[in-house]
Image (tube, helix red, strand yellow):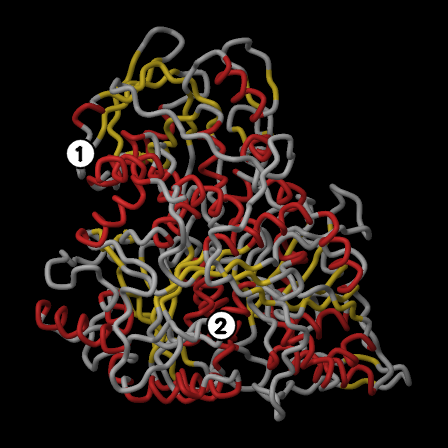
Amino acid sequence: EVPVLILSFFQHALNSGVRRYHVAPVLCQRAKVAMSHFEPNEYINYEKLEKNINIVRKRLDRPLTLSEKIVYGHLDDPAKQEIERGKTYLRLRPDRVAMQDATAQMAMLQFISSGLPKVAVPSTIHCDHLIEAQSGGEKDLRRAKDINQEVYNFLATAGAKYGVGFWKPGSGIIHQIILENYSYPGVMLIGTDSHTPNGGGLGGICIGVGGADAVDVMAGIPWELKCPKVIGVKLTGKLSGWTSPKDVILKVAGILTVKGGTGAIIEYHGPGVDSISCTGMATICNMGAEIGATTSIFPYNERMKKYLGKTGRADIAALADEFKQHLVPDSGCQYDQVIEINLSELKPHINGPFTPDLAHPVSDIGAVAEKEGWPVDIRVGLIGSCTNSSYEDMGRSAAVAKQALAHGLKCKSKFTITPGSEQIRATIERDGYAKVLREVGGLVLANACGPCIGQWDRKDIKKGEKNTIVTSYNRNFTGRNDANPETHAFVTSPEIVTALSIAGTLKFNPETDYLTGADGKKFKLEAPDADELPKLEFDPGQDTYQYPPKDGSGQHVDVSPTSQRLQLLEPFDKWDGKDLEDMLILIKVKGKCTTDHISAAGPWLKFRGHLDNISNNLLIGAINIENGKANSVRNALTQEFGPVPDTARYYKKMGVKWAVIGDENYGEGSSREHAALEPRHLGGRVIITKSFARIHETNLKKQGLLPLTFADPADYNKIHPVDKLSIVGLKDFAPGKPLKCIIKHPNGSQETIMLNHTFNESQIEWFQAGSALNRMKELQQKSS
């Protein structure tokens, strides 16, 4: 039975602009084209997009970038919305939501807490993060289904009850599934994974968010996004030889660095675009997350049309052709920054170690590695992942492998292959690519994230052993792939990974160097060539999708109170109306602090649905400036050093509020909101840094924390781990108004510094209510 207050909320919602399922989309009058095969009654609404674009263009009176067209085309109120790039907050109506299983647990737990009966937009859950790479695809999948049965059952039943489609384990990686089935030109999709921008390869605005943002959209509430700036990347020339789409983003990462895209959409344009396949464009957009970009996008073109046709969506391509003027940038549009790359001159790149923006031409990496003392022998080469697991990627890698096999060679390094989806796995098996890759020494893993996110039971080295791996993944932070801080991980294209794995060393340049065949004769690898799409139709493989029932109200969702994997959420406490006085400093972080440092993945993924258990990994990877160690901080109440989570729990038990001090681009990397939920759960109140990554800053706000930045970055040096902090003036907390911080040193002296913030009025209400979810419930109660 639906509570009366929820029914009242919906009645109020219809009058205040909140969208309801099956109500909002106005059917296309030219043709009714479904958004996907799986939602035949949900239609693409280009006419609404066109109407909104025309309203905004008339208001702004200037040509629009493609990013602006799609973003502003999804405005809740295009006639009245204040629009200023990099300044105003936009209220948007995304078309759909996608969630991977590790983040979906907390997102669905929050949605359950909202009390709403059904999601308001098409939404899906994808099981890809909980499958550990160990001995091969089939065995690893069986093991994962057994170990994670409780979580999979929760997600499947929650999906059925609340109207969410469920992609079972083994179906593939969320971003590949979205590209194959859900992304389309002009769509606005939000996903609870930082690599959601992969869908920009099909001309959509696809943005990675935390679970609380997904809950807003699933609840039918307008979603807030700071109006993004637009960085234009003009591509000229043509890709050829060993140079691949991956090299475009590796080069851009080297130019912009890990925070250069923060607050901006990267929009690729120019004549060079047409030389890149649709899946290649997706690769480029996917790794845009590594430069902090809100998302990345390519304009609709024939390569996208070809891909839509091959994936059974020719009707979407035909409709996109009719509305093409809205799916490409206007002539004369202005970008906030422009980068130009000549694809004809671009060389193969390899980035790393320990950060994805340390770019090197492949021709230089051997010499650089020797100079820097990085191991040049490659222990493992790994291809696949959500970034590079397309049919074309596998074909180009197989083309390299075939040449080695023809000369009697196999990989000197261990070699693994991760298909991006069941469709890709089945098709490369049928067409012989998988056989070739196995023959050269490869192990085909499950259709899942696997080693890319640390789901790798690695046996060939001991923890602490210095070694090098090369991958076609997107991220290479310290310890990310195998939890070994001494693993030097480099990211490059799949074909370069394959070539380097055959040679076994970073000192090999396939463009110029020779290998020695089994017959003793030297030979040179030719640049790989492969079809971007299969000549036959894709083989869909096994059916791995669970449709939500038309009426899921009778479905039971079980969360055991004794479960170690799942835990229903309790509301966070409201702000007490007072200033935050005499907070202790849990840790002052030195240097890079990604979401992997704040809330590690790998073995911790199994606790993503249990907030108290996963909080035992809080900041265990962050380096404490006081002693240069990870997971070792001084307890200010006992003066003893101990693990970060234990110290936080002690402060919470003693009723003491605490803060974290961070460096630049704090919280870069994954979208995981656990990095915000955990500090809130363990009693944290304020995170003060030089700067934040976009998704993490929003996640902190959503959970009732105060993410603040030094007005003067040099003030970072004024705060010491033994100090106490007070944030004063919270009764007058207002948009654009800095907050005052009083630093109290142990010797009795004090200093006052100013802290900036990016809160708007509604976000301040989240803080005051204790969280965004608390505020949503307050609004529901007021409307009843």
Q: Which residue is mark 1?
A: 734
Q: Residues within 10 Å of mark 1 (few under 14, many from 20)?
A: some
In which quadrant of the rendered view does residue 371 lie? Answer: bottom right
Asked if residue 555 lies left or right of residue 708, the reply is: right
Q: Residues within 10 Å of mark 2 (few under 14, many from 20)?
A: some
Which structural element holds mark 1? loop
Asked if residue 529 lies left or right of residue 231, the reply is: right
Asked if residue 205 lies left or right of residue 24, the reply is: right
Q: Mark 2 belongs to which amino acid?
A: Phe
Q: Which residue is mark 2?
A: 38
Which one is earlier in the sequence, the residue at label 1 or at label 2?
2
In which quadrant of the rendered view does residue 399 lie? Answer: bottom right
Alpha-carbon distance for marks 1 and 2?
Answer: 45 Å
In the depicted structure, whether residue 119 falls above or below residue 648: below
What x and y, as percent, mark residue 169?
65, 60
What x and y, as percent, mark residue 236?
38, 83
User: Is disc 1 in contact with disc 2, using a CB cutoff of under 8 Å?
Assistant: no
- Residue at the image position 59 percent from the left and 48 percent from the top: 154
- Residue at the image position 76 percent from the left and 72 percent from the top: 503
Q: Mark 1 belongs to which amino acid?
A: Ala
Q: Is residue 225 visible?
A: no
- Residue at the image position 25 percent from the left and 41 percent from the top: 758
Q: Nearer the viewer, residue 124 or 780?
A: 780
Which quarter of the rendering shows the N terminus?
Answer: top left
Q: Nearer the viewer, residue 327 or 667?
A: 327
What x and y, as percent, mark residue 22?
33, 65
- Residue at the image position 18 percent from the left and 38 percent from the top: 735
